[in-house]
Amino acid sequence: MVTVAIADKDDSVRSALSLAVDQLGYENGGEARDLSALLALLENRQQDVLLLDWTLCCASGNHCLLQVKKKYPHLFIIITCTRPESRSRVCPDGADAVIYKTDPPEVVLAVLRRISGQVTVGRLPHHDR
């Protein structure tokens, strides 16, 4: 079963994402509202996918994203953000996908399905992609 962790400052966003995870029948791997809670969550439990708020720890999510990718390279990361212009900055920095907090539920579910399908195949080492 695919395990999905959720990291977002906003309780209502975490709740909505948790509902999407449950609706797909994936395991909710836990929730975090800040970077320290996220790192503790990742340290204590194997996760497959992370839904990560782009502004979890600062105005630009590069710090969080790069820190998590360095320590957990196997983790598939879906960035959640509010501004469409974030997409061009996020994906080159190592995110596997981007969803907007204003996306309809069917878009969020489709992205989760696509990324979760990759979990079952496994992540290739960087030089083999």
Image (cartoon, rainbow, N blue to C red):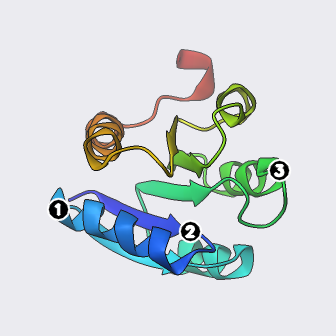
Quarter where residue 90 is shown: top right
In the image, residue 11 lies at what x, y percent? 51, 80
The label number, if any, that marks residue 60 in the structure image: 3
Helix, strand or loop at mark 2: strand
Please state which of residues 47 and 59 is positioned toward the viewer in this rendering: 59
Residue for badge 2: 7
Residue drawn 61% across the image and 55% down it: 72
Quarter where residue 58 is shown: bottom right
Residue drawn 59% across the image and 75% down it: 43
**Residue situated furthest top in the rendering:** 128
Q: Amino acid at mark 1?
A: Gln
Q: Neighbour class for label 2 at 10 Å: few (<14), some, many (≥20)?
A: many
Q: Mark 1 and mark 2 in contact? Answer it, CB < 8 Å.
A: no
Query: Reading the chain from its start, which is encountered first: label 1 or label 2?
Result: 2
Q: Amino acid at mark 3?
A: Ser
Residue for badge 1: 23
- Residue 74 in sight: no
